Amino acid sequence: MRKVVAGGLLLVVLAELMTFVLARRWALPVAGLAVALLAWELRSRFAGVASDDSADKGADDSLESLLRWRSQTEAMVRWADSSRADWDRHLRPKLAREFVLATRQREPAALAATGRMVFGSDLWQWVDPQNVVAATGREPGPGRDTLDEILRRMELL
């Protein structure tokens, strides 16, 4: 906004200087034209164009949110197909946090019992926040199919 006002005032000053140097009788109409251009620009910034910009900004925010979600999903799939250490470091905390929020279970014993009921013993071991194993090499993670099944069951909650 400051740039528009400063540019408009500079335009008015330059227009007046040019008219004084070239022809004095055109000083008032040229200065009026410069002021009118400045007023038109300010009006368009405050009025109708601002509503179009906000719609574009909302679309940009939606697109940015979608791109961020896609990037996070791709990262989750890569971690699922990677090692157990990557699963424990990146996916297990996210999955456990979402499960705790969905079930509202704070007590570890109740959380484990609910987890076994929802996921079964085979899948619960990959969500259980207490089941982190110290990285002893490149043990493979459970994979994309296991992540897909865990997410499908969490959707049912």
Image (spheres, rainbow, N blue to C red):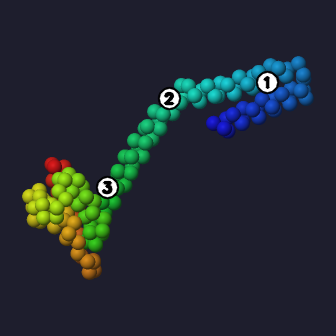
Judging depth in this view, the residue of 157 and 144 nearest the camera is: 157
Q: Is residue 77 visible?
A: no
Locate residue 70, reporting x and y percent: 35, 52
Looking at the rendered image, the quarter that the N terminus falls into is top right
Counting residues from the start of the chain, the first of labels 3 and 1 encountered is: 1
Distance from Cα at disc 2 to Cα at disc 3? 33 Å
Distance from Cα at disc 3 to Cα at disc 1? 58 Å
Task: Please state if 12 lies on the left or on the right of 154 as rendered.
Answer: right
Distance from Cα at disc 2 to Cα at disc 1? 30 Å
Q: Which of the 4 image quadrants contains residue 61? A: top left
Outermost residue on the bottom side: it is: 136
Q: In the rendered image, which residue does mark 2 sit on?
A: 51
Locate residue 115, reporting x and y percent: 13, 60
Which residue type does callout 2 highlight? Answer: Ser
Q: Residues within 10 Å of mark 3 (few under 14, many from 20)?
A: few
Q: Is residue 41 above or below residue 95?
A: above
Residue found 26% across the figure and 69% down from its top:
88
Q: Is residue 99 above or below residue 134?
A: above
Q: Which of the 4 image quadrants contains residue 117? A: bottom left
Q: Is residue 58 above or below residue 83?
A: above
Disc 3 secondary structure class: helix
Q: Residues within 10 Å of mark 2 (few under 14, many from 20)?
A: few
Which residue type does callout 3 highlight? Answer: Thr
Locate residue 51, reporting x and y percent: 50, 29
Q: Is residue 55 visible?
A: yes
Q: In the rendered image, which residue does mark 1 sit on?
A: 31
Which residue type does callout 1 highlight? Answer: Ala
Residue 73 image label: 3
